[in-house]
Image (cartoon, rainbow, N blue to C red):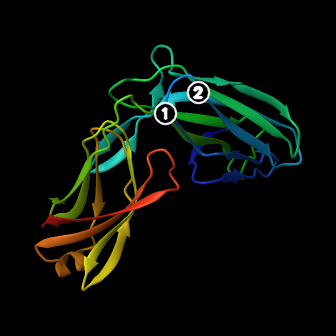
């Protein structure tokens, strides 16, 4: 029997229902520690009509550029983690009940943020499709410990890769930047070209500019960016800037 693991990133609130039970929800879906010694709680809710068993794993959150795209390259933590998670295994969570998960930050890096992915996996028996493939579902939540000295800095530029136009976001700071939406001004109107997502320190992300829109842009490009808050991701700030083509 083939086994396939599916990773689902968390947005504001997520749940997933298995045909054989095991549906659950987690909230909040992103954790930020400003200082060590703090405890944050995640609540897991069993939405199914059967007992739920889960297991959690903490991995380093890394990114690498592949053909202009930022790809996650997460790995097991080398040495002791900066965050302690309890409990790791949760058994016999009754239907419609809640389970609290505690995260404790025990240290921080003075000059750069520490970023993890916290995974929760359903250990209940999985549904098997007609091909005999067994699916495993994991949720991946971002856990961040901010540095003592925060430098939130990034820049945007117009570049071409293989002859195609892109807006390049370069993170020059020591904390992540999360751009929810990027707009280009065309004929006096803002045109959304997509979201950049999370860009870690010292990384760059590329957002494609549609060819038709690119032709309508002048030598000076007006941009408007919806940037998520560093601590509260639901808070946004509107940033407007001009870059040269």
Q: Residues within 10 Å of mark 1 (few under 14, many from 20)?
A: some
CB under 8 Å between callouts 1 and 2?
yes
- The Cα atoms of the two marked residues, 1 and 2, are separated by 8 Å
Say if residue 186 shows up in the picture: yes
Q: Quadrant of residue 105?
A: top right
Q: Is residue 53 depicted above or below 205 in this figure? A: above
Q: Which residue is mark 1?
A: 34
- Number of other residues with Cα within 10 Å of mark 2, as a class: few under 14, some 14 to 19, many 20 or more: few
Q: Quadrant of residue 157?
A: bottom left
For the point 35% across and 36% down, which residue is it? 150
The x, y position of residue 167, in whole percent, is 24, 61
46 sits to left or right of 118: right
Question: Which residue is found at the position 81% from the left and 29% from the top?
Answer: 91
What element does badge 2 sit on? loop
Expressed as whole percent of the image width and height from the top left, the position of residue 54 reads 73, 33
- Measuring from the top left, give residue 205's x and y in whole percent: 30, 51
Identity of the residue furthest to the bottom in this view: 187
Q: Decide which of 130, 60 is in the foreground and name it.
A: 60
- Name the residue rendered at 50%, 14% in the picture: 80
| 147, above or below 169, in the image | above
Examine the rendered structure and indicate whether residue 123 appears above or below residue 139: above
The residue drawn where x is 82% and y is 48% is 20
On the rendered image, what quadrant is the C terminus found in?
bottom left
Q: Residue furthest top?
A: 79
Mark number for residue 38?
A: 2
Identify the element where label 1 is drawn. Answer: loop
- Visible residue check, residue 123: no
Quarter-of-image position of residue 193:
bottom left
**24 vs 91: above or below:** below
Describe residue 103's horizontal placement relative to residue 145 as left or right. Answer: right
Horizontal arrangement in the rendering, residue 220 relative to residue 238 (left or right): left
């Amino acid at each position: 029997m083939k086994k396939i693991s599916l990773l689902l990133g968390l947005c504001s609130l997520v749940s997933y229902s298995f045909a054989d039970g095991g549906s659950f929800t987690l909230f909040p879906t992103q954790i930020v520690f400003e200082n060590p010694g703090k405890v944050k709680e995640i609540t897991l809710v069993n939405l199914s009509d059967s007992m739920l068993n889960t297991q959690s794993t903490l991995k380093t959150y890394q990114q690498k550029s592949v053909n202009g795209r930022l790809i996650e390259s997460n790995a097991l933590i080398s040495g002791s983690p900066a965050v302690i998670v309890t409990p790791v295994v949760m058994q016999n969570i009754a239907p419609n009940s809640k389970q609290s998960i505690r995260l404790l930050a025990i240290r921080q890096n003075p000059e750069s943020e520490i970023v993890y992915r916290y995974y929760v996996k359903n250990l209940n028996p999985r549904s098997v499709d007609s091909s005999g493939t067994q699916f495993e579902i994991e949720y991946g939540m971002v856990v961040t410990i901010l540095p003592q000295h925060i430098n939130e800095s990034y820049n945007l530029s117009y570049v071409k890769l293989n002859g195609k136009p892109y807006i390049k976001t370069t993170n020059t700071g020591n904390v992540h930047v999360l751009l929810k939406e990027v707009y280009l001004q065309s004929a006096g109107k803002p045109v959304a070209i997509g979201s950049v997502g999370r860009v870690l320190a010292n990384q760059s992300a590329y957002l494609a500019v549609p060819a038709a829109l690119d032709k309508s842009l002048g030598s000076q490009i007006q941009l408007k960016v919806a940037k998520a808050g560093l601590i509260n991701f639901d808070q946004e700030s509107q940033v407007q800037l001009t870059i040269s083509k």
